[in-house]
Amino acid sequence: MSWAVEVHNLNVWYGDKHVIRNVSFRVPKNVVLAIMGPSGCGKSTLLRAMNRLLDLNPHARVEGQVKINGINIYGDNVDVTWVRRQFGMVFQIPNPFPHLSIYENVALGPKLNGLVRSKSELDELVKEALQKAYLWDEVKNDLKKPASMLSGGQQQRLCIARALALKPRIILMDEPTANLDPVAASKIEELLLELKEDYTIIIVTHNPQQAARVSDYVAFIYMGELIEIGETSTIFTRPTHVLTEKYVLGRMG
Ligand SMILES: Nc1ncnc2c1ncn2[C@@H]1O[C@H](COP(=O)(O)OP(=O)(O)O)[C@@H](O)[C@H]1O
Ligand SMILES: [Mg+2]
């Protein structure tokens, strides 16, 4: 089996605080993996270690391996730009460029990265990304309007379109619906089921119900340790660890 991502003995420290403790797991291609666990357990840190976003924090130290296509992204001679291009990232608070147009929010990355040669190619790429993010029909007549005119849920789908336009292999999402109303949240959940046909998706959530709804596999993290990982149906019906059981039954904060 070839894996989308393999994490081996990953450790992360902030200063001398050890926040990810010897975590190892593998993610098959074209699935949704939910990383769940209580607030502060290390979910965001784990996600940020996977695309070397922690490099930007001088107090963070990472040990261990994260492999994509068999290549350790922390290895010598690895191009960090290449690493980041493998991943799309979507954050908890939708962060489009508010003053740029809807069109430019999606077009900017491909332009800066030289992914397109003509205006018509760019138009097509923007349209395709907005369609894949279930946003095209709502915005096709407003492409020149600023992103700030969109609702929170639409802004988050715009951020997803922006990520897709860069043609990543893996999409990392850090609590992407935490700031959305239930209707907007469920649109994004629906979208995940379709996106996994083309991408591998890793979504962080502190909501076990959401993990149960959207994922094929679940990893349960507690105080920086990977307690359990497995198929979602198994984790929710027959967890092997008492901490996992408590968490999925909602008996833990
Ligand atoms: N930039 C940082 N500097 C120092 N400590 C941090 C930083 N970010 C997070 N932490 C700490 O690391 C631990 C894990 O945080 P985080 O990964 O954000 O957890 P989660 O996303 O599960 O809520 C927490 O104890 C948090 O306080
Ligand atoms: Mg977090």
Image (cartoon, rainbow, N blue to C red):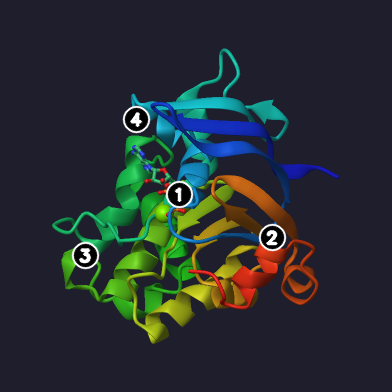
Mark 1, other Cα within 10 Å: few <14 / some 14–19 / many ≥20:
many
Cβ of disc 2 within 8 Å of ligand 1? no
- Kindly identify which residue carries mark 2: 31
Residue toward you, 232 or 72: 232
Q: In this view, does 125 lie to the left or right of 227?
A: left
Q: Are marks 2 and 3 in contact (CB under 8 Å)?
A: no
Q: Are marks 4 and 1 in contact (CB under 8 Å)?
A: no
Check mark 1 vs ligand 2: CB closer than 8 Å? yes or no.
yes
Residue 183: x and y in percent read 40, 86
Mark 2, Cα crowd under 10 Å, few <14 / some 14-19 / many 20+, is: many
- First in residue order: circle 4 vs circle 3: 4
Q: What residue type is labelled 3?
A: Ala
**Residue 199, visible in the rendered structure:** no
Q: Residue 147 carries which label?
A: 3
> Which image quarter: residue 1?
top right
Q: How dense is the environment of label 4, judged by Cα within 10 Å: few (below 14), some, or many (20 and up)?
A: few
Disc 4, ligand 1: is the CB inside 8 Å?
yes
Tell me the CA gap for discs 2 and 1. 19 Å
Residue 137 coordinates in the image, percent (x, y): 38, 79
Judge by depth and name the residue closer to the eye, 184 or 66. 66
Q: Could you tell me which secondary element the residue under label 2 belongs to?
A: loop
Q: Which residue is pictured at 38% across the width and 69% down the height?
A: 178
Question: Which circle, 2 or 3, is nearer the viewer?
Answer: 2
For marks 2 and 3 on the same chain, the one whose residue lies earlier in the sequence: 2
Percent coordinates x, y for residue 150 in the rendering? 23, 73
**Foreground mark, 3 or 1?**
1
Of labels 3 and 1, earlier in sequence is 1
Residue under the point 70% across and 35% down: 69
Q: Mark 1 points at which residue?
A: 44
Residue 57's disc is: 4
Indicate the amino acid at tag 2. Val
